[in-house]
Amino acid sequence: MRNASPLFIGVCADLIVRGPHAYHQSGDKYIRALMHGDTPVVPLVIPALFHTLSKACQSAFIEKLDGVLLTGSYSNLHPSYYEEAEQEGDDAERDPHRDASNWALFDSVLAADLPMLGICRGFQELNVYFGGSLHHRLHEVKGLMDHREDKEQPVEQQYAPAHPVQLSGQGILSEWFASQQSIQVNSIHMQGVKELGHGLQVEARAEDGLIEAFSRPHSSFLLALQWHPEWRPEQYPQNAQILTGFIEACQTWRDKRSQR
Ligand SMILES: N[C@@H](CCC(=O)NCCCC(=O)O)C(=O)O
């Protein structure tokens, strides 16, 4: 019999400044996506100040979790994390607290080998954490498509399937979508993987060759996607399947931990 008590899944936050105050925020769709399925999940927002906690507090917090979800964000990771300078045209918001907080969070999550799902900015952060780098503006790179959403369109259109990605034939996504060689994904990003980080395995590529998903075979479960599976799982079964797969990985991990 499976443990029926709720899973506790941490969700990273952005530090968003509104007027004279700053707020730790995780997007509503990420939180709701975790609560969408049949498995009871309590999402716990992780303040974007994880790096300021003592090591003892970091470990105590991580011990309470069964998995971690990294959200997307309109802000961009500072290029100093991949040893590059800001470029002319780097006009997206920055979030230095999220950058620093998630770096400390990754150290702790990987030390505990907790399951982790990275989405969009979270995908890009994980690539850089493992030593990879990013294109600052994909649409200016010869041979690559424009992967940005059309901001003039209603949000349903912005997050609707936009292009196919070819599955690698091995890995987590190819196992979940065993009957498919490619799947359609949405596309809401300006940046993307330039060099892939160490120890990461390509899971899917867009038609222009851009890496759109990777996993880390060395981890209990680490999957990162450039697209947004948190978008309306009730409408898009493929998104629901990705979320269910992640939540099952968290459950399996908790079962194993309780047997130790
Ligand atoms: N800023 C980066 C990452 C893109 C991203 O995460 N977009 C998410 C938008 C808001 C959301 O859906 O949560 C880039 O442009 O590449």
Image (cartoon, rainbow, N blue to C red):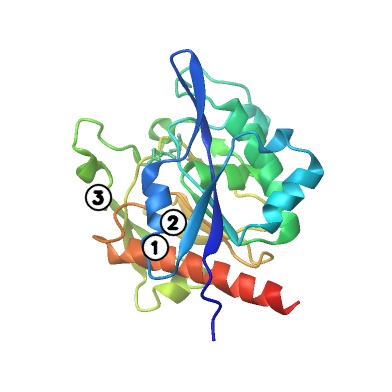
Disc 1, disc 2: CB below 8 Å? yes
Mark yes or no: residue 227 visible. Answer: no
Name the quadrant containing residue 55: top right
Q: Which residue lies furthest to the top in this view?
A: 20
Say which mark, if any, is on residue 31.
none
Residue drawn at 41 percent across, 35 percent down: 190
Residue 243 percent across, percent down from the top left = 42, 63
Q: Distance between the residues labelled 1 and 2?
A: 5 Å
Identify which residue, 71 or 199, lies in the foreground: 71
Q: Residues within 10 Å of mark 2 (few under 14, many from 20)?
A: some
Identify which residue, 90 or 256, lies in the foreground: 256
Considering the numbered disc 3 on the image, is that residue within a helix, a strand or a loop?
loop
Residue 112 percent across, percent down from the top left = 73, 59
Going from the N terminus, do you reach mark 2 or mark 3 first? Answer: 3
Please, what is the three-letter code of the amino acid marked with disc 2?
A: Arg
Going from the N terminus, do you reach mark 1 or mark 2 first? Answer: 1
Q: Distance between the residues labelled 3 and 1?
A: 18 Å
Say which mark, if any, is on residue 205.
2
Going from the N terminus, do you reach mark 3 or mark 1 first? Answer: 3
Image side of residue 184 versus residue 97, left or right: left
Mark yes or no: residue 252 visible. Answer: yes
Please, what is the three-letter code of the amino acid marked with disc 1?
A: Gln
